Image: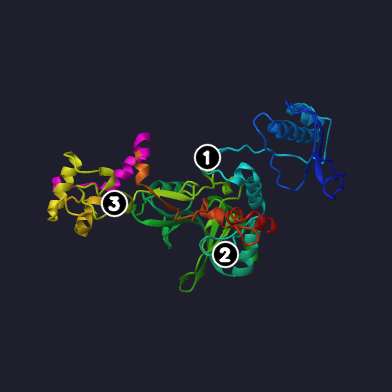
Amino acid sequence: MKEESITVSDATGYEAIEIFGAREHNLKNLDLSIPRNKLVVITGISGSGKSSLAFDTLYAEGQRRYMESFSAYARSFIGNMERPDVDKINGLSPVISIEQKTTSRNPRSTVGTVTEIYDFFRLLFARAGEAFSYVTGEKMVRQSEDQIIQHLFDNFNQKKISLLAPVVKGRKGHYRELFEEIRKSGFTKVRIDGEITDLVPKMQVDRYKIHDIEIVIDRLLVQEVDRYRISQSVTATLKQGKGIMMVVPHLDKGDGKAQFFSKYLMDPVSGISYDEPAPNMFSFNSPYGACPTCNGLGHIEEITEDSIIPDRALSIAQGGIAPLGEYRDIWIFRTLETLVKKYKGKLATPINELPKECLQVILHGNLESEAKPTLQFQGILKFLQEYNEHGSEYAQDWLQEYKTVRVCPDCQGARLKKESLHFKIDGRNISELANLDLNDLEAW
């Protein structure tokens, strides 16, 4: 190439990458200049030295110089890299080489995860993100024991209150063992669904109803002379409630509205709390961060009515239910024929002309106890879904044709659980940042 005069730039000292005497592999003492900050394509016939120039000379030398910037101690673990056969290269920056092929079979893999930029985002949000409640939108707060105690004196001075430790929140069960454990720990009262009750042996609640249960740790009058007792009670309440406690004021007409306090991130209005943020909480490759509905994929695959009945003008006998195919003298078609006859129809009737109730039974089943055994049917959709969940790899591949893909209804494609999506920096969560155009992200 024609030699150009060297122009010094502010960035690296050169406007071009200048190569002198490149002799790697089949390069014949090549001198050339490649402009910086441009998209440059190297072309040529097979064996002309394209890879020798790009990878074995430029990339190898850039990588070697970068490694040499490490300390001798660090280089002792990495090893030394050979210098390519070239006289001199000017204006070369640290380099990266990206192969032209798919680097990962992981369906959750993105440009951010492959380049590890997303790892820094996760660390940033774990250390600097502000938590907000997914229930009320309020900013989550955390308080030390001293702050909680001071809050009690500031807001409930000379008032009677109960200190409660929540142990069950919105769950079903009879909790017989839990009540016995609480009683053996020395506590005499619990609050069940808002009502304070004395603990008695063999006590239990309706196992089929949802319950909120709190241990009544102490009932007291907030006054300065009892500061030590209040301090001890707060400590005990936080211990029993695993870092969370409730304060219920005693009013003339009964107990007032409970206030929540927590040593961890907590919504002061609804009482929900978050785990302490950690980098894996913001990873859709981790069970600690991935949306439980889509397992971190951002979408779900479903077998639906429309996916197994693409043409409702066809009859069942003609293959209108696609996974079954056309009529054959087998159990499933004989069963469907019996079901359809009950609704005065035939397998040759177009599906869009069958009664809605009949189609409902065919797709979703009819397993009522009063139904005759010959009319009991699991339903095509339920059968296919179970086959998909528990069938062989062959079955999964076969059913792929009858699945439809839609955005996850819980995370809306963000792939993270709702707690992770409610940590924000400058009003944006990590998923919103990951979806930004690179120029917009740089500006942010």
How packed mark 2 is, by other alpha carbons closer than 10 Å (few <14, some 14-19, many 20 or more), is: some
Residue 390: where, in percent of width, then height?
35, 38
How packed mark 3 is, by other alpha carbons closer than 10 Å (few <14, some 14-19, many 20 or more), is: some
Residue type (three-letter) at the residue carrying disc 2: Glu
Q: Quadrant of residue 94?
A: top right
Do we see residue 192 in this rendering?
yes
Residue type (three-letter) at the residue carrying disc 3: Ile
Question: Quadrant where the C terminus lies?
Answer: bottom right
Question: Quadrant where the N terminus lies?
Answer: top right
Rendered view: 283 above or below 103: below
Tell me which numbered mark, 1 or 2, is placed earlier along the sequence: 1
> Helix, strand, or loop for circle 2?
loop
The magenta stretch is 371-397
- Mark number, residue 106: 1
Q: Is residue 339 magenta?
A: no
Labels 1, 3: front one: 3
Residue type (three-letter) at the residue carrying disc 1: Asn
The mark tally for this picture is: 3
Query: Pointer 2: what residue?
Result: 138
Tell me which numbered mark, 2 or 3, is placed earlier along the sequence: 2
Q: Residue at x 69, y 59 (%)?
A: 443
Question: Hey, which residue is sitting farthest bottom in the picture?
Answer: 252
> Helix, strand, or loop for circle 3?
loop
Q: Is residue 375 magenta?
A: yes
Query: Pointer 3: what residue?
Result: 309
Indicate left or right for 19 with 355 as reference.
Answer: right
Rendered view: 208 above or below 77: below
Indicate left or right for 296 with 390 as reference.
Answer: right
Tell me which numbered mark, 1 or 3, is placed earlier along the sequence: 1
Q: CA distance from mark 2 to mark 3?
A: 46 Å
Q: Quadrant of residue 46?
A: top right
Rendered view: 378 above or below 261: above
